[in-house]
């Protein structure tokens, strides 16, 4: 593959709901332009985009792949993104480095949930986009109905640039309203528009011309004077309205059969911006914000948008050159990590095939292997001209599982493996939950977690299984308690003796306080340290249900010691047991984490959400309105939210989203606490039997 300079590059993301036809459209682009000798099939696992074992097994895209298509001396880097909601992080990463998007809409299903979500992210990045009504050769295909479903969703007006030449089995190709020609099949040769479509085409062209005139004041005047525009003027006006986002152009195709792909590629070159035409990139420099033009002469700024682990090559780093140019073997500075990296072997990817490159120019996308410190979101630059590019914002992971290693050998690798998985996927995160002693992995949904676990096994050779995570309850007391305990052990030689008298009381403003009210000589103060040590250990392990206890004040007020048998370990045990007895007297309770939950749904689902919240012991705090959507705000116990991601999708057809964060702790109702305590007792009994 030859080198392409900035003005001859396009970076275009393909986005839609799952099964919208993105992968097969990319396949058709490659095949029609001579990039491959035959078109692959998803069913056979032979597409260029879906090359990972998991993608072939599931027959769907799980990560963004790069498909560079060479056409008319240009290179279009198509970013084929996953459509399934769990992998939205991959969509965000791709849109972060794209200059435009093609939004695919199924000709039968119309606007679907995944498409709405992707559309929203395109809005976030302010990307110009083309709307493609795809799969026009399907049974029940309906161009007008699909178009209406998108227009109903979009606040920006849509304007058809093409009409379908037939529908369903009769779909032959496209009728182009700019050139007023018909293009059969892939669109290599122009033909006259068939008579039966001529009237509809002329009517639609008028709407197209009016839209083009709005892109330029001079064109508007000319259009009002003459009632028409030349083809050159029309092209100029159309480019302006598309790049400004004033209108979204609509195209048609049947990607899996290659119909309509060349006119669509022409539209990408003519309407969507090259990196040089896109808005300047903002970076943070030594003296504040810097506007970076996409040019080889600008200061070097490279953004890392993705990293993956390859079992054969090692770590692969995906990057986009935002400004400046990059030579193979160059040494450049990671401004985030403060370390130097060597760009040993530059390549561009086509699916899984790496094509070596000597240099990459501003605006291009490439990969490099074996960078040591660099991770997703970092900026590489010239050490003498440090720059930092803004990272993308990813949604918080809300689906939690506890991770268990399959073998002892896997247990040793669990921490670096999870760290590596989370470096690759910015919507994954993990942590150790101290109150439950579990390793928690968080993702966007069950499929997301399942794929991560399989990647750990396939790529990193670490066996992991998942179980439902325990809720991090806390134990506490509600009133004062008093107890004593004498520890006495005689073993033939020196024995153990320690007696502790203590009282406890709730401590609302602190986790733990230990003090004494000792008088006289019954107990030496030197034994207070082991007594406190025994109590602190018990606080960590819990007394009634195995969860940490907090908000307790302990006062040691008396005790007894033996001149020979008393030693620190005896008072550690006596303190621990006295504390347990005092807790039993002090009205012990379980506290549970209460989350502040914000559920955003279309207005029609509000009643279902409110009713569902009641079944989850939730207390609705209020509602807010956001452009035809309702936000329900509620306080809900975490125990009731563990699988809410899946339930909300089911309840709202995938249109609902939610966010939650910890708010406070509350007492667990007695009937629920009883079940938790009994389960803990049973678990302890089983361990003793073992």
Image (cartoon, grey):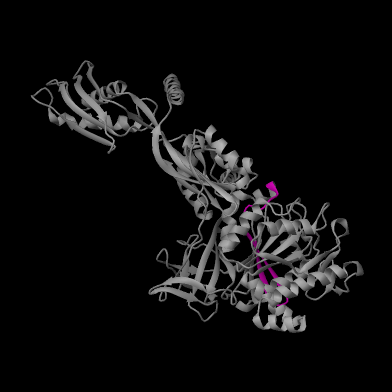
Residue 685 x/y as whole percent? 43, 20
Quadrant holding the C terminus = top left
Residue at 77% in and 84% down: 226
In this view of the protein, which residue sits in the foreground, 567 or 230? 230
Going by the image, does 518 lie left or right of 575?
left
Image quadrant holding the N terminus, namely: bottom right
Tell me the magenta residue range: 58-79
The x and y percentages for residue 260 are 79, 66
Q: Nearer the viewer, residue 300 or 484?
A: 484
74 inside magenta stretch = yes
Q: Is residue 507 above or below residue 197?
A: above
Q: Residue at x 77, y 80 (%)?
A: 227
Above/below status of 548 relative to 522: below
Q: Where is residue 477 in the image (x, y as percent from the top left)?
A: 32, 28
- On the image, which quarter does residue 183 sit in? bottom right
Determine if residue 619 is in view: yes
Q: Quadrant of residue 494?
A: top left
At which x and y percent is residue 374? 47, 62
Tell whether 83 sits left or right of 435.
right
Viewer-nearest residue: 296 or 135: 135
Q: Residue furthest front?
A: 225
Q: Which residue lies furthest to the left in this view?
A: 520
Residue 83 seen in the figure = no
């Amino acid at each position: 593959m030859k080198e392409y300079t900035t003005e001859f590059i396009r970076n275009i993301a393909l986005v839609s709901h799952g099964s919208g036809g993105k992968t097969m459209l990319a396949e058709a682009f490659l095949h029609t332009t001579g990039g491959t000798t035959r078109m692959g099939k998803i069913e056979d696992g032979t597409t260029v985009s879906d090359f990972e074992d998991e993608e072939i097994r599931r027959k769907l895209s799980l990560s963004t792949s790069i498909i560079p298509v060479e056409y008319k001396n240009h290179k279009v880097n198509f970013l084929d993104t996953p459509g399934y909601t769990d992998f939205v992080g991959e969509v965000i990463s791709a849109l972060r480095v794209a200059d435009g998007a093609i939004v695919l809409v199924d000709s039968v299903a119309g606007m679907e949930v995944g498409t709405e979500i992707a559309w929203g992210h395109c809005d976030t990045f302010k990307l110009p986009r083309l709307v493609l009504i795809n799969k026009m050769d399907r049974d029940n295909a309906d161009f007008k109905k699909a178009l209406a479903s998108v227009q109903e969703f979009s606040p920006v007006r849509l304007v058809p640039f093409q009409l379908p030449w037939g529908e369903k089995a009769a779909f032959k190709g496209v009728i182009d309203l700019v050139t007023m020609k018909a293009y059969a099949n892939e669109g290599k040769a122009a033909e006259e528009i068939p008579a039966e479509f001529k009237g509809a085409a002329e009517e639609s062209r008028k709407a197209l011309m009016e839209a083009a005139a709005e892109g330029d004041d001079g064109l508007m005047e000319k259009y009002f004077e003459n009632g028409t525009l030349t083809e050159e003027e029309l092209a100029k006006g159309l480019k302006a309205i598309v790049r400004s986002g004033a209108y979204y152009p609509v195209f048609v195709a049947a990607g899996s059969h290659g119909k309509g792909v060349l006119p669509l590629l022409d539209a990408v070159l003519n309407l969507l911006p090259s990196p040089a035409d896109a808005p300047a990139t903002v970076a943070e420099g030594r003296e504040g914000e810097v506007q970076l033009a996409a040019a080889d002469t600008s200061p070097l700024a490279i953004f890392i948008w993705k990293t993956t682990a390859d079992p054969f090559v090692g770590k692969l780093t995906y990057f986009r050159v935002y400004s400046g140019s990059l030579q193979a073997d160059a040494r450049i500075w990671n401004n985030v990590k403060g370390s130097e990296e060597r760009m040993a072997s530059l390549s561009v990817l086509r699916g899984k095939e790496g094509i070596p490159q000597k240099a990459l120019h501003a605006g291009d996308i490439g990969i490099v292997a074996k960078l040591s410190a660099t991770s997703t979101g970092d900026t590489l630059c010239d050490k003498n001209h440090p720059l930092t590019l803004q990272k993308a914002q990813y949604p918080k992971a809300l689906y939690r599982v506890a991770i268990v290693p399959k073998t002892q050998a896997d247990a040793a690798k669990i921490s670096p493996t999870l760290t590596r998985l989370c470096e690759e996927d910015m919507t994954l995160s993990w942590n150790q939950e101290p109150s439950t002693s579990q390793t928690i992995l968080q993702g966007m949904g069950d499929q997301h977690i399942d794929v991560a676990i399989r990647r750990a096994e396939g790529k990193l050779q670490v066996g992991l299984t998942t179980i439902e995570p325990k809720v991090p309850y806390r134990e506490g007391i509600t009133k004062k308690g008093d107890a004593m305990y004498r520890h006495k052990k005689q073993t033939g030689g020196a024995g153990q003796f320690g007696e502790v008298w203590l009282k406890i009381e709730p401590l609302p403003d602190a986790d733990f306080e230990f003090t004494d009210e000792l008088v006289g000589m019954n107990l030496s103060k030197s034994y207070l340290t082991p007594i406190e040590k025994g109590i602190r250990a018990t606080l960590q392990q819990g007394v009634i249900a195995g969860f940490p206890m907090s908000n307790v004040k302990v006062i040691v007020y008396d005790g007894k010691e033996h001149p020979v048998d008393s030693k620190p370990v005896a008072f550690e045990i006596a303190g621990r047991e006295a504390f347990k007895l005092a807790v039993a007297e002090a009205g012990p309770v379980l506290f549970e984490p209460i989350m502040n939950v914000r559920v955003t749904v279309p207005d029609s689902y509000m009643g279902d959400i409110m009713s569902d919240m009641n079944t989850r012991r939730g207390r609705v705090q209020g509602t807010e309105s956001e452009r035809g959507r309702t936000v329900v705000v509620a306080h809900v116990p975490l125990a009731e939210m563990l699988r809410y991601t899946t339930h909300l999708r089911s309840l709202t057809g995938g249109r609902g989203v939610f966010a939650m964060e910890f708010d406070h702790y509350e007492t667990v109702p007695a009937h629920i606490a009883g079940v938790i305590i009994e389960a803990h007792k049973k678990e302890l009994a089983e361990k003793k039997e073992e």
